[in-house]
Image (cartoon, rainbow, N blue to C red):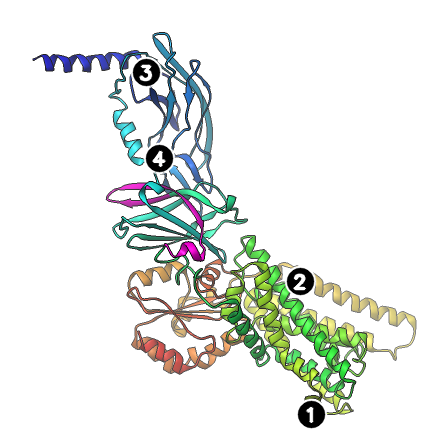
Amino acid sequence: MRRWVSAMFLAGTAVFLSMMSHAEVFYGEEIEVELISETSNVVPGQTLWLGLRLDPSEHWHTYSRWQGDSGEASELLEWELPAGTEVGELMFPTPTWLPFPGSDLVTFAYEKEVVLPIALEIPETLTGDTFEASALARWQVCDEICLLGQTRVAISLPVGDSLQIDPRWEAAFAQTRADMPLPADEHDVQALFAVAGDRISFSFQAADQDFDDASDVWFFPESKRILKPGPVRDVIVDGGLVQITHEQARRLQIPNDRIDGVFAVARDGRTQGYLVTAEPATTENLSSLSVMAMNDSGSSNASGGPGLLTVMLFALLGGAILNLMPCVFPVLSLKVLSLASTSQSEHSHQKMHGLAYTAGIVVTFMVLASVLLALRAGGEAVGWAFQLQSPWFVAALIYLFFTMALSLSGVYEFGTSFMGAGGGLANKSGYRGSFFTGVLASVVASPCTAPFMGVALGFALSQTWLVAMVVFISLGIGMALPFLLLSFSPALMRFMPKPGAWMNTFKEFMAFPLYATVLWLLWVLGMQVGINGMAAVAGACILLAFGLWLLQQRTIAGPFWRNANAVMCAAAVVVAIYILQSPLLSASQSRTAVAGDDVYAEENFEPFATARLEELQAAGQPVFINMTAAWCITCLANEQTTLSSARVAQAMEDNNITYLKGDWTNQDPEISRILDQFDRPSVPLYVLYPGAGRDPVILPQILTPAIVVDAFNSI
C-alpha cells in the first residue's frame, strides 16, 4: 500500500513540477519553435539537457549541420543564463537525404519534428528557487522557397534536490538519442576516400557488422564543396564494406586532407549514423580494407593498375600508331614535302627539322592536356578531344585546312615556308614550318584514339599535373618518332627522292587529302549544329577562296583595283569570323539524340541514357554500350565495318542483348561519367554488361566482327 502511495506521490510531484516549468513557443505558419527540457527541474551541480524543438508544417523542412547543396543549420545564440552555467554544443541527429523536386539538388534535412539537444552544466553555487534560461534561436525552413527566422526562446524551471523526467518530452529525447550518430572509433567503422576524374568515392568498413541487409546507405559530409549529391550516387554493399561514389563538387575543397561527416545505414525501418573522418586512400591504409572504393564500377583502382613506366610505354606505342590513322594523313603529307625538300640538306639541318616537328607535337599535347586538366579541376565533365565538341573550333579548323588546300592548289601562295612546304626550309622560317606542322598534326590527331592510348590517357587524367605531363610527352614523342628517326638517320634519308620539279606536282596533289578533310569536318559540323550552320561555314569558305583569288590577281593594273581586292578579301575574312560566333553555330542535339523511334528500330540501337542502363541492369538484361562521336574516325570505321554487320546483329539478337549508343559529338555529362567510370578520357568506348550481376567487359578500341561476336556468345 505504501509503495502505491509513494508512486502516486512521485507522479503527482512530476506533474506539479511540469506545471511550474514555463517555456515560450513560437507559432508560425511554416514552423513551431520551442526550447524544451528533458527534466521538469534543475539540480545544482548536475547536467541539464535542453532541446531546441523544431516542428515544420507539412512539406516544409529544416536543416542539420550537414546541409548538402543548400540550407543553413539551426542555431542557439546569445544565451542569458545564471552565472557559472556552462553551455555545450548544439547536437544534431542523423539527417535524411532529401532531393529537391525537379532538379539535381539534394539537401540533408529534417522533414518532421526534430529536437536538437544541448547540455548545460548547472553550477553548484546556483541560488534561488527557479532557473531562468533564454537564447536567440535562428533557423531556416524551406519548401519551394526558403525562409530565415529567429526568435527569443526561454524556459523557466524550478530548482530541486533530484532530477525529475518531464513526461511530456521523455519520448522525444529518447528518440533523439537513438537518432544521434555514434562515434565511429567506438564501433570500429573505418572510412577512406579517393578522387578520380570528376568523381569522389568513399569506402566504409565495420569488422563486426554486415551491411547486406541495409535498405540504403548515405554519406553526409560536414563541409560543402566535397560532393555533388545529385544525380550520381553509385552504391555498392558487400558484407561489412560499403562504397559510395558521387560526382565531386565544382572546385573541390578538402580541408586538412580529411573529410568529416556522417555515414548512415538504413535497415529495419530506422537509420543509424556514424560520425566518421575519411582519410585519403593510400597503399598502406588500403590493406585494412578488403575492397578499395574505386573499383571497376567507380572508374579507378587506387591500389592497382599499370605503373608509370608501363603507361609511358603505352603512350609511346599509341602515339606511334596515330601516324597510321586516316585523320592524321592529310597533315603528314605536308611533312613528306618537308622531308623530301631537306633530303639533300646538311645532316644538322635535317635533325633540327625533326626536333622542331617533335617540339610542335609535344608542346601541343601538353597545352591540350593542361587545358583539359584545368577544366576538369573546375568541375567540367570534359575528356580528350574536348575541343572538337565546340562547333566554333571545328569551323576554325575547316577554314584553316581549306586555306591550306587552296595554297597547295596554287590559288594563293603564302610563301615557300608556309607549313613546312617549299625549298627554303633550311632556315629559321623553315624550322617554324616544321614546328607548326607538328602542331597541326597533333590537333587533327586528337579525335583519334589509337590502341594503348586509352589506358595511358585514362591514367594521366587521374594523376597530378606533373605525372600527366610525363605521359603526354611520351605520347607526343611516340607520334613524332617515325620522322624523328628518319631525320636523325642519314642512311634512311638517302632513300628520300631528290628535290625537283616533281615536288610542285606532288604539292598540288596533296591538296586533295586536305579537301577531303574539310569535307569530313563539314559533316562533323553538320552533325553538331545542323544543315544551316554547315551551309554558313561552307559559304564562308567560298568567300575566302574568292578573296584569296582576288589577291592573287596581280595582273590587274592600278592601285584602286588592288585596294578594292584587298578590301573584299578582308570582308570575306570578317564574314568568316562573324560566323564563328553566330547563333548558327550553337550546338544542337546530334542525329542519334533527335531521331525518332523508327530510326532506332532500323539501326537496332537505343539512345544511351543512364536511367535506361540502370533499368536493364536491374532486370539482369545483357547490355552493349557504344560511346561514339561524329569526329571520331575510329568510331565510324568500327561502326561501318563491324557493328553494322549482319553477323554482329545476329549475335546480338541470339543473345538477347540490348544495344545502347551514346553520341558524344557534342558535350554530354552522362556519357562523360561513363567514360570516367572506365578510365577512358575519350571515345570510342565499347562495354558489354553480361547481366546477372557479372562484371562489365571492355572491348578493344579497334573492333572486328569476330571479336564482338565472341564477346556476345561468351555471356
The amino acid type, in three-letter code, at marker 1 is Phe
Disc 3 or disc 1, which is closer to the eye?
A: 3
Residue 59 sits in quarter: top left
Tell me the CA gap for discs 3 and 1: 101 Å
Residue linked to disc 1: 495
Q: Earlier in the sequence, mark 4 or mark 3?
A: 3
Query: Is the stretch drawn in magenta largely helix, strand or loop?
Result: strand
Residue 274, horizontal then vertical, whole percent: 35, 41
Pointer 4 local density, CA inside 10 Å: few below 14, some 14–19, many at least 20 = many
The amino acid type, in three-letter code, at marker 3 is Val
Q: Earlier in the sequence, mark 4 or mark 2?
A: 4
Disc 3 or disc 2, which is closer to the eye?
A: 3
Residue linked to disc 2: 580
Residue 145, horizontal then vertical, whole percent: 45, 35
Q: Secondary structure at mark 4?
A: loop
Q: Secondary structure at mark 1?
A: loop
Residue 57, horizontal then vertical, whole percent: 35, 30
Q: Secondary structure at mark 3?
A: loop
The amino acid type, in three-letter code, at marker 4 is Pro
Of residues 63 and 365, the one drawn nearer to the viewer in this rendering: 365
Which region of the structure is painted magenta?
263-288
Tell me the CA gap for discs 1 and 2: 44 Å
Q: Which numbered disc covers residue 93?
A: 4
Disc 4 or disc 2, which is closer to the eye?
A: 4
Residue linked to disc 3: 42
